[in-house]
Amino acid sequence: TLVMGACGALYLATLAADVDGIEASGLLSFLSPSGRSLFLFGASGALPVFQLGHWWTVLSAAWLHGGLLHILFNMMWVRDLAPATARLYGPGRTVIVYTVSAITGFLASSLAGAFLPFLPRFLGGAGFTVGASAPIFGLIGALLHYGRRGGSSVIGQQAKSLALTMLLFGFIMPGIDN
């Protein structure tokens, strides 16, 4: 509930911060906050982290979203995965998994964007990025770990299936920061 509420409030705030910059055309970019607004609120990537020294964006970017469909799909995943993770690990550890996964994912993307320009575009990191995919993969990883350590093979299999589905989606859809 905390993650979904904070992400929703920040999404609305990024729209309100630059009303003239809201993108309204196209399905994937419908109701997208402007790049300026996302930058002001803490978008991450090679540009903010390494060129501008905004190191804190590896944490803030996980709470920001680039459009209506982006936030809807991400919050749908959080709604499905966070309660299951909290039941198995406790709410405090779930917040830690979410936060550490966000930092790790955005740091990896920023490093790849800044120092590995030779990688293919779908693996090359990002100059500018937002979203909850890294923490969502962290929640899936926690569920996968639970299944592997003997907690439940069913949970482990479901987590593996979710991870493969999301990875496939990430390679097929344009603009996703893998």
Image (tube, rainbow, N blue to C red):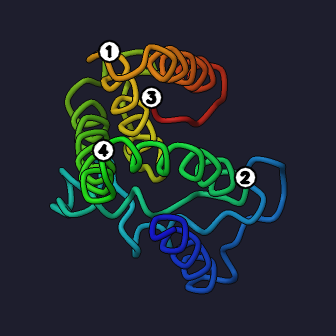
- Kind of residue at disc 4: Tyr
Tell us which disc is closer to us: 3 or 1. Answer: 1
Quarter of the image containing the C terminus?
top left
Mark 1 or mark 2: which is in front?
Answer: 1
What is the distance, in whole Å, between disc 3 and disc 2 at their CAs?
Answer: 18 Å
State the residue lying farthest toward the front: 151
User: Pointer 2: what residue?
Assistant: 69
Kindly state the secondary structure of the residue where label 1 is placed: helix
Classify mark 4: helix, strand or loop: helix
Mark 2 or mark 3, which is nearer the start of the sequence?
2
* Residue at the spot of label 1: 148
Q: How far apart are labels 4 and 2 at the CA level? A: 29 Å
Question: Mark 4 = which residue?
Answer: 89
Across and down, in percent, residue 13 comes to 55, 82
Q: Which mark is residue 26?
A: none
Displayed quadrant of residue 161: top right
- Marks 4 and 1, how far apart in space? 14 Å
Secondary element type, mark 3? loop
Horizontal arrangement in the rendering, residue 56 relative to residue 88 (left or right): left
Q: Is residue 12 above or below residue 157?
A: below
**Residue closest to the eye, 117 or 86:** 86
- Counting from the top left corner in percent of width and height, residue 34 is at 59, 68
- Around disc 2, counting alpha carbons within 10 Å, would you say few (fewer than 14), some (14 to 19), or many (20 or more)? some
Q: Using a 10 Å C-alpha cutoff, classify the residue at mark 3 as few (fewer than 14 neighbours), some (14 to 19) or many (20 or more).
A: some
Say what amino acid the circle numbered 3 marks.
Answer: Asn
Q: Which residue is mark 3?
A: 178
Of mark 4 and mark 1, the one earlier in the sequence is 4
Structural distance between the alpha carbons of marks 1 and 2 = 33 Å
Residue type, mark 2 in image:
Leu
Q: Nearer the viewer, mark 4 or mark 3?
A: 4
- Between the residue at mark 4 and the residue at mark 3, the CA separation in whole angstroms equals 26 Å
